[in-house]
Image (spheres, helix red, strand yellow):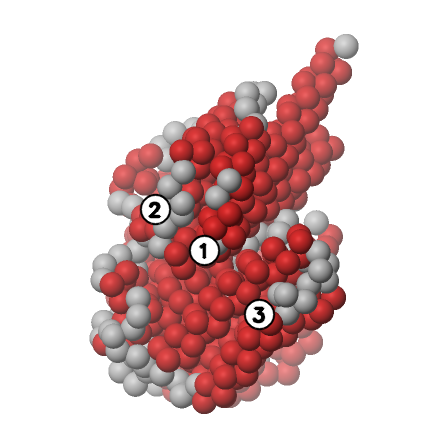
Amino acid sequence: MLRSLIDLKPRDVPLRVALRNTIAVVAPLAVGLAIDQVPAGLAMTTGAINTMFTDQPGPYRQRMQHMLMAAAAAGLSALVGILVGGHMWLFALAAALAGLLGGLLVALGPVIARVGMSSMIVLIITADMQVPTVHAPGVAALIFAGGVLQMLMAVAAWPLQRYRPERFALAIVLRQLADVAHSRPDTSLPPPVSMAAMEALETLHGEYRSRGRAMQSFRIIAELCERVRIELLSLGDVLERVEDPDAMARIRSVLAGAEAILGHLSDAMQAAEKPLRAEQEVTTLGARVDALAHAVDAVSGARDRRLLRIAVLRAQGLAGQLRALVRNSDWASSRGEIRAELADAKLPAALRPGNPLQTLRANLDLSSVAMRHAIRCAVCLGIAVACERLLEIPHGAWIPMTAAIVLRPDFGGTLRFGLLRVAGTFGGLLLTSLVVHLVVDNTVLSLLLMALLCIGFRLLATVNYGLGVAMLTGMLVLLLAFEGIPPGDAIHMRVLGTTLGSALALVAYLLWPTWEGQRSDIALARLIDGYRAHILAVLGNDIGALHETRTTARAARTRVLASLDRMRAEPGRERAAELVATESFLANAHRLIRTSLSLEAALRDEGTLPQLPELSAFASEVDASLAAIADALRNRTLPQVRSPRVAERQLAKALSRDEALAASPAGMALADTCDRIADSIDTLAHLLRQARAHDAKAIAEPAG
């Protein structure tokens, strides 16, 4: 937890985004000051700040819709807040209902959840403004207008740079592929490029995708990137197992050439330029692949010779995919080699957004994380509002506002955000105390300081939340100064409200917690189901299903990794032991899915795998074994798993009886992959039995 307070993440907000957000925040206030309409300027600035958080990467249509939704929600919340602000119990009830609905929105994803949280904050702020109810529609309209201004700034480049989000999404995928070629990630780690590839899929195939001829080229490139990823990982896997030094050097040379091509392609894609340097490197890569092929006969060991033959096949496939990538990167039309596979530009089922009402209805259950979070939010906001009004705490709205910001669906997030918010608030108050008295009487300097703090907040909020809060605190003190509240009073209110609100959120979570360890096995079971479906599609020659099964597995893996992050922040020795077991199981699950890559590549090359009854029997055993492991995870029972090793040995004998088949690319990949799949399944079953034995021992010890 202490590490999380000082941890600095990579900055993911470009400077141009921070600048346009700042213009939309400061401009209305500057105009309001110039024409002596400060309240109107402050209202629009409030709407711009609220909507700023939904200015996220993605297609322009998606960005516009999300920001309009945030602006409308802020306007409606402001209207309700002003109307009920003068009635304590109505305000407490409205705050509780806003907390319930806003908390439940976490079930619809982070962007919608952010809109829900912002709406809670706007309702609380406007209820405390003591605006006459007759002015409520006007203030709400101004707050909405501020959000619309922020949205217009975010989509202003749409007509001039129509495909910029798509190009940037693909450039990130290409850059990460270059990193894979350079670093060759360990098989125990999550397969790389998964998250970037999923985001690119949503950008290119999702509901808000752009239209136009160039989009077909982008989709071709996205599919080629997936094939390149498979070839890179397969080639790196061979490199880990081969022992001949000369063979290792030649494989590394091929990977270095691929890294250079992918890096140049990424740069060209981001700059919308012709990939001239990548075209030059493709010829060099062909020579390196030829050198690798000539080295096969010089290798002495039978095992290394067999692995090197597999490496040659994968290197040749990689070179072909990279050549196609270079051709299509130069704005290829729909004549690309794989256009037939891309005729249906639909998002895979695992990434398609479900019906929001059905999703919310499904979460109306006390076992739902979203529902428990919603109830905590409702209770915290209702109690905070009632207490600050009954105790007549001056500007006590800081307390429920802080509770709404800090409270998260998980314990680690709540504790981390609470501590970072308190630390950031004190840091921001120290910063503001040193600066604000120098500029508070100078309007121009105050606006400049406001702009600097807004830029700093936008750039630093994702780097370290505490640093972002420090900038935000300074912004809020300045805004209150424009409203006539002295900086000294604002600082005192902020300290008290932040401390009490953070404490309230943490106490609420501790009184009714939702521990991640209770749900991690369910997430792991879904992951094993996803891996199982993908491996069966490979073994069953179902090329058409691979895109869907791969995406489903990636989505499940993303949820497991998020679950692990939440578990790491939870206290208790029992949870620490469970975390170690989960991490070990997950590492071996990663190895399982990586074993299928070379066979998947061979399947794409050959079009089909050998039609052997032994292969069908092995696939059935793999299906049954992984299903048993998934069931044991769901039910937290001892796994009743039968090893697929016997079926694998029978398949190996069947392959060895046909020398031509055994020496073919598909035969070599099949023998190698099935052996490793059997090993991985046996290891997963062993680890799960160990975990269940540890659980039984932990239960028995207190009883003893």
Left or right, 520 with respect to 153, comes to right
Q: Residues within 10 Å of mark 3 (few under 14, many from 20)?
A: some
Whole-percent x, y for residue 8 in the image: 66, 64
Q: Amino acid at mark 3?
A: Ala
Q: Mark on residue 542? A: 2
Q: Nearer the viewer, residue 688 or 156?
A: 688
Instruction: Give yes or no for contact between labels 3 and 2 (Cβ–Cβ under 8 Å).
Output: no
Q: Secondary structure at mark 3?
A: helix
Q: Position of residue 612 (x, y in %)?
A: 40, 38
Question: Which circle, 2 or 1, is nearer the viewer?
Answer: 1
List the single residue furthest toward the top: 704
| Residue 609 relative to residue 513: left or right | left
**Gap between marks 3 and 2, in whole Å?**
30 Å
For marks 2 and 1 on the same chain, the one whose residue lies earlier in the sequence: 2
Q: Secondary structure at mark 2?
A: loop
Is 91 above or below relative to 322?
A: above
Quick one: label 2, few (<14), some, or many (20+) residues within 10 Å? some
95 or 13: nearer the viewer? 13
Helix, strand or loop at mark 1: helix
Q: Is residue 315 visible?
A: yes
Relative to 21, does residue 545 appear above or below in the rendering? above
Disc number placed over residue 293 in the picture, else none: 3
The residue under the point 59% across, 42% down is: 676
Residue 61 visible somewhere in the drawing: no
Disc 1 designates what residue?
Answer: 602
The answer to whether the residues at label 2 and label 1 have Cβ atoms under 8 Å apart is no
Amino acid type, residue under disc 2 in the picture: Asp
The amino acid type, in three-letter code, at marker 1 is Ala
Work out how far the residue at label 3 is from the one at label 1, CA to CA, in angstroms. 17 Å
